[in-house]
Amino acid sequence: MHIDFAPPSKGTYNNVGTCRQLANYMEHEDLERMEKGIYTEGFFNLTDDNIYKSKVIKDIDCNIGQLLKTDAKFYAIHVSPSKSELRAMGNTEQEQAEAMKRYIREVFIPEYAKNFNKGLSETDIKFYGKIHFDRSRSNDKLNMHCHLVISRKDQANKKKLSPLTNHKNTKNGIIKGGFNRLNLFQQIEKGFDNLFYYNRQQTESFNYHNTMKNGSLSEQIEVKEQNICSDEKKNIIPDCKLESKSSFNLKNKQTNKSSFNMDSKTKSDIPYRQGNNPSSDSFISFVSSGTDSSFNPSNPKEEKTKPQKKKKKVHRL
């Protein structure tokens, strides 16, 4: 899952004034899809769907109490699943869109609120989302993603909330709380996996990519080694299983051989388990029988000889 906090600019993402330009951009795909008769999704928030753009603009633009003219009034966030994550979210665009809204409502916004360390919950966050189904400059069919516009102030229009602050969890000074973006990325990834029962590979994880991009050389090597060990464990059968299987086969051979009564027949007359081929199991059959020490394996045609009884002497009177 790729999360992007759009940097403020003088264009679409200019966040020191009205959010009208951003709202217009978030809705532009609908007009193109409606002309083609394709399914579209309206704006949504924590509880409602198909919200009008005019309400979105009004709510965000009016929730700016005690903010200066040059202060940020809102933030734009992009939530973009990978191909494999999208497949876990559904088979159709509509299924994926419903899954995305559920993910935003049940995972992303609750973790976003908690991450400010100010005792906030999802109901304290004023936001609106919009599903997009196409990505510019992309030929990939699996490209659904979500745009969020989140107010700088909470629902009560009292607390300032900035996900771009460098403070993480301060307890002293003017600024209390903060925002730990790394922790947010980790928690929403876990939330996604739990919500959609997604079996995430190590190379897909945020920690792996973050380490390979920002970690030291030793940390990168350690992560790669962990990934190699993980792959090897998936392909290797534990020794205990191999040993158990061998013991089981040998036991079966011994049981079958013991149940066969060796009499005066020659070795060539003894039926082998795998046809009558003496070369297949001859050694195991011999060792496992253990019933006749006089039998010579080098001469399979040799018959066993019985000891002759001594004649009793008769004494005449």
Image (cartoon, rainbow, N blue to C red):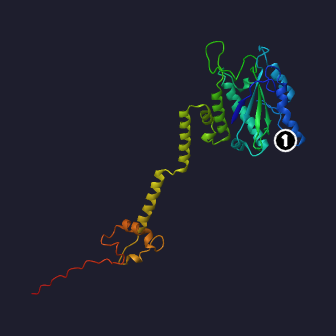
Q: Position of residue 144 (x, y in %)?
A: 76, 39
Q: Using a 10 Å C-alpha cutoff, classify the residue at mark 1 as few (fewer than 14 neighbours), some (14 to 19) or many (20 or more).
A: few
Image point (52%, 50%), residue name? 236
Name of the residue lying farthest toward the right: 35
Q: Position of residue 203 (x, y in %)?
A: 61, 40
Up-down relation of residue 242 to residue 142 (above or below): below
Up-down relation of residue 164 to residue 283 (above or below): above
> Which quarter of the image is occupied by the C terminus?
bottom left
Image point (82%, 37%), residue name? 41
224 sits left or right of 150 in the view = left
Amino acid type, label 1? Tyr
Q: Is residue 258 visible?
A: no
Identify the image quadrant of residue 166.
top right
Identify the image quadrant of residue 281.
bottom left
Q: Which residue is mark 1?
A: 39
Q: Secondary structure at mark 1?
A: loop
